[in-house]
Amino acid sequence: MKSLAELAAIREQMQDQVALRIGGKADEKSKVRAHVLVCAGTGCTSSGSHKVVEALNEQLQAKNLQEEIKIVTTGCFGLCALGPVMIVYPEGTFYSRVTAEDIPEIVKEHFVNGRPVERLEYKDPLADNKTLPLPETSFYKKQHRVALRNCGVINPEIIEEYIAMGGYQALGKVLTEMTPADVIQTIKDSGLRGRGGGGFPTGTKWQFAANSVSDKKYVVCNADEGDPGAFMDRSVLEGDPHAVLEAMAIAGYAIGADEGYIYVRAEYPIAVQRLNIAVGQAREKGLLGKDIFGTGFNFDIQVRLGSGAFVCGEETALLTSIEGHRGEPRPRPPFPAVKGLFGQPTIINNVETYANVAQIIINGADWFASMGTEKSKGTKVFALGGKITNTGLVEVPMGTTLREVLYEIGGGIPGGKKFKAAQTGGPSGGCIPASLIDTPIDYDSLISIGSMMGSGGLIVMDEDNCMVDIAKFFLEFTVDESCGKCTPCRLGTRRMLEILTRITEGKGEDGDIEKLEELAMNIKATALCGLGQTAPNPVLSTLRYFRDEYEAHIYEKRCPAGHCKKLAKIMIDPEKCKGCSLCSKVCPVNAISGQVKSPFVIDQEKCIKCGTCVEKCRFGAIVKK
């Protein structure tokens, strides 16, 4: 693309195509009267959204409506638990859990007769089960979408739709109106910090690389999202890949680089496919490659696949992997901004960090800095999972409290259970107890209570979760994913896991807690990379806030949550048992016996603590202790 005029022409031509989705009106000459947006992200695809699209095409053709009703396959809308999700614009009708079998009814009633299908409309449980347009639901109205602004709005496989939403306008601006120093200063002034975990100031990182003298520099995108329960970066890549490409090109201009790499997990096939499509389209339009906008600036991007090693989320291990070697971290200094990929100055940011860059350039540093807190500017995307009603993707201003996220957006804990803790930061983070539910979610607040922001995984736990077992779960993951290069991580975490395993099996000993704490502090102080240094965090945070659970496991041989099978006992209350015999019928090991209409009993020697009888008992007579 040789001029901004060409970009503007595409934007003007395409704006009518997206007008219906963003509160505008279609051109009077247009035959299109409705857009049907169907989520084609990983979550909805796994639930059959591709079959929904096929059925829509068939039914619209059968009714000769294919020119009036436009189908748009998008990225993630956010409410993953309700997929497949389908939104009809301009009215904003929000259909959830749509199947291919529902499509004939939707086409007939909604598109022919003009009546939405009420049984499929999403009913907001926090708004008296009212049927509301998507932006007005409790899940969305407190969110502020910056990184996710195009996800669920545009077709990510059509570059013209991204351009219609202002795409590549920021790149044009920096190449024609700003110096590299101007760009870096704007990012500094915005207060943007890295969204990958550490929260390092993005503009400062770019400044270090710009100051490094070299004939060759690189821009790298860390899309190796490996935390259990995290899918923020995947959703951005699936729903708005051009936002990352544009930002990388801007970063290349700022530091003096002409080449970039996106390192993405091979386990993200939809993201990889759409990235490759986006790169091809950007090259075809002249938005990547040589002489972009006729300014003489050259920049191109290559996609590299990671094979699932969690350690490759650490920046130096990632660079080593791109170079074709086994992914292992390097000692720092020198830092990548001085000596990075192939020994050259390199900046590395994650997907969400890049997703903010173009909007900062267009809207200004003050606009971004006006959101969030004094030291944590902007918004943050979280993958909300675990024991929560609204599982999905959430973007809120920094400083929003955990309570707001869990109850006003997430819909609270299912089944009337009590909130117990939330794990932020994945295996590198820590648990936030119920007593700290009003903690603002920002970098410094989380660190002060023994957790961390991490990349944005937010796992919710209720009263049935054992915190010792939670610590064991995350440590198992870290032990399995350790690259083995340094002794503290390779052996220290394994020793910690052995102690935790003994404790959850009822073999804990006096002094185990002290051993865990000593090992944890030594590993934090001596491990080579961030993975090892933060691996003990889940153990330390659960010891800090749930020490009584450790003590109950060790000294009373009891799991307070009734979760650890080797410590649990499942009992039948004879006062409540009606003798219906259902429990004995569902027991997989025949551990329950008795006479009909008389209280049943459980043979503790045979019982495997699977909990099936607890779930099936209609009278609440069976409890796990």
Image: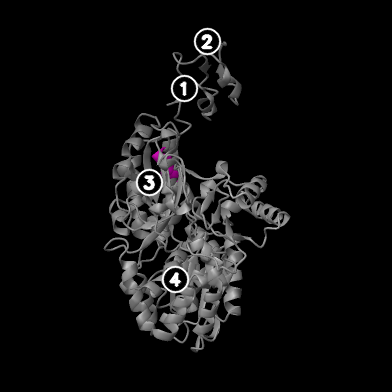
Determine whether 97 is above or below 596 in the image.
below
Q: Is residue 189 visible?
A: yes
Q: Which sits in the foreground, 359 or 330?
A: 359
Label at residue 348: 4
Residue 174 in the figure: left or right of residue 151: left
Q: Nearer the viewer, mark 3 or mark 1?
A: 3
Which residue is label 2 attached to? 598
Residue in the image at 44% along x and 54% along y:
135
Return the residue found at the far right.
62
Q: Residues within 10 Å of mark 4 (few under 14, many from 20)?
A: many
Q: Secondary structure at mark 1?
A: loop
Instruction: Report the amino acid beneath label 4.
Output: Ile
Image coordinates for residue 321, horizontal then vertical, percent: 53, 68
| Residue 509 lies in quadrant | top left
The residue type indicated by label 3 comes to Glu
Q: Is residue 358 above or below residue 34?
A: below
- Residue 578 in picture, x, y percent from top left: 51, 14
Please report the bounds of the magenta region as a residue range. Answer: 466-473
Residue hosting label 3: 408
CB within 8 Å, label 2 to label 3: no
Q: Quadrant of the C terminus?
A: top left
Q: CA distance from mark 1 to mark 2?
A: 16 Å
Circle 1 residue: 620
- Determine the secondary structure under disc 4: strand
| Residue at x 57%, y 76% (from the top left corner) | 282
